Structure formats: C-alpha cells, structure tokens
Image: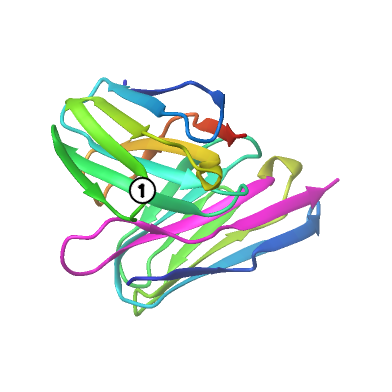
C-alpha cells in the first residue's frame, strides 16, 4: 500500500533558528496536505499543494511539492515558541479511489 | 460556517466493556466522514471513512465498527474493548475525499 514517510521524527531548536521537515511518498501523489497539531490538540489544516514543483508561503512557512510529486517539504524561518507542535503531511495516491495517507509527523520543540 | 462536534472528550472504560463515540457535523451536507486513531501522540491511523449514509469503508481489521445513521452523524462502536484500543480518537470531515479534512477535538480513551 501507499506509504508516506516523514523525517525527522523530532527536532528541538532554539527560537530564531530555522526548521525543515521532509515528506516522501512511495507513489506519485495527486496532492499533498500539511497539518499542524499543537500539544493536546487536534490536527489543523495548513495548506494543500497540487501542482508539480509548486511553492506556497504562509508568513514564515514555506511549502514545496516536488517535481515528481512524490515528496514535499515544510520550512519554517526563524522559529517562534508558537510554532511548537507536530507537523503532518498527508498525501493521496494519484490513481484510483484512495484516501489520504498521513505521515507519522515531525514533532517540533522550540526553546526560548 | 461548518462545525464538528465530538464527544465525550475523555473516557475511561474497563476491558470488555462496550464503546460508543459520536461525531456530528453542522453547516454542510453530505460530507465525507472519517474516524482516526492516534496512539502515543503520534501518527494518524485511518479506521473508517464514509461517503454517504450507510456507506462505511473499513481500513483496518479490528474489533471496532462504525455507522452513519444520518447524513451528518458518524458513530464509532465496539462490543468489547481491548487494552490495545486505548488512544486518541479523532473524527474528521471533508467536502470531498481529496479536500482538506477538518478534525474534531478528539476523545482520549483509556482502557483499564
């Protein structure tokens, strides 16, 4: 079945440092979505990427979708303590009827 | 605007007891509905999804079941809980299967 892998599993940074999480799929994806889950909370949708090579920005967050539509990344510039949480990517296979497959997430801890 | 309600927020049940978790969505019609389990605060495992009343697809074999008696109501059940059923259960909805998913606040289930 489809697998979506995320690295790293965990990262601890100092406030102001940059952070990147990577997402790789074993199959070509029709789209990729990113979610953030704060400690004790539920996942919240951040963004969806659909086009090959697409890049989208939300303030300090930059999202990329690979040219082959099999990988994606989320980069946070100058992290803040409010960025703490687990970031999940989720992708859907580019054929047939399939549901979203979530990666295991990257837990980000930011120290002041 | 659309809202999703999930209850209870926390639940402690003995092994072998039954389970019923309810999820309702307001402000939209014919949503796609999902039940996920998140173990140990990490990855999301899709348990069931539904594209319409009475239509349930199971992603993993287990002692859990789901039902959709009404358009915007999704119920997760078990006749006899196992210790391994402990976890954080999340309900979610989307307009269509490839659209962003919106999660409820979740139920933290502990089996004793």
Residue A102 picture location, percent across and down: 43, 58
What's the image's color scheme? rainbow
Residue at point 36%, 61% (across, down): A91
Please tell me which residue is depicted at 58% across the width and 52% down the height of the picture.
B42
Per the image, is A108 magenta? yes
Q: Considering only vertical position in the picture, is A10 above or below B6?
A: below
Q: Position of residue B2 (x, y in %)?
A: 31, 23
Left of B49 or right of it: where is A21?
right
Q: Is residue B32 left or right of residue B63?
A: left
Judging from the image, mark 1 belongs to the subunit labelled B
Which residue is under mark 1?
B47
Whether residue B33 is visible here, answered yes or no, is yes
* Residue B68 picture location, percent across and down: 21, 30
Quadrant (top left, top right, bottom left, bottom right) of the C terminus of chain B: top right
Tell me the crowding category of disc 1: few under 14, some 14 to 19, or many 20 or more residues within 10 angstroms, Cα based: many
Tell which of A49 and A25 is nearer to you. A25
Q: Does the magenta stretch include residue B46?
A: no
- Please state the extent of the stretch shown in magenta in the rendering: A84-112
Numbered circles on residues, count: 1
Is A89 positioned to the left or the right of B49 in the image?
right
State the quadrant of the N terminus of chain B: top left
Residue B19, above or below B63: above
């Amino acid at each position: 079945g489809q697998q979506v892998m995320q690295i790293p599993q965990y990262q601890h940074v100092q406030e102001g440092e940059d952070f990147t999480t990577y997402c790789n799929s074993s199959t070509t994806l029709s789209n990729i979505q990113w979610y953030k889950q704060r400690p004790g909370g539920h996942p919240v949708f951040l963004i969806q990427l659909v086009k090959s090579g697409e890049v989208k920005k939300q303030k300090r967050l930059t999202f990329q979708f690979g040219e082959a539509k099999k990988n994606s990344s989320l980069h946070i510039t100058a992290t803040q303590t409010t960025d703490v949480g687990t970031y999940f990517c989720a992708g859907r296979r580019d054929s047939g009827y399939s549901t979203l497959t979530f990666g295991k997430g990257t837990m980000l801890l930011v120290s002041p | 605007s659309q809202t999703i309600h999930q209850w209870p927020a926390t639940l402690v049940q003995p092994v072998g007891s039954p389970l019923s978790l309810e999820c309702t969505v307001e402000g939209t019609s014919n949503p796609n509905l999902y039940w996920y389990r998140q173990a140990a605060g990490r990855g999301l495992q899709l348990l069931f999804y539904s594209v319409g009343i009475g239509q349930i697809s199971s992603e993993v074999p287990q002692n859990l079941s789901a039902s959709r008696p009404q358009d915007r109501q999704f119920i997760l059940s078990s006749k006899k809980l196992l210790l391994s059923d402990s976890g954080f259960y999340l309900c979610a909805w989307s307009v269509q299967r490839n659209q962003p998913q919106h999660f409820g606040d979740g139920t933290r289930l502990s089996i004793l």
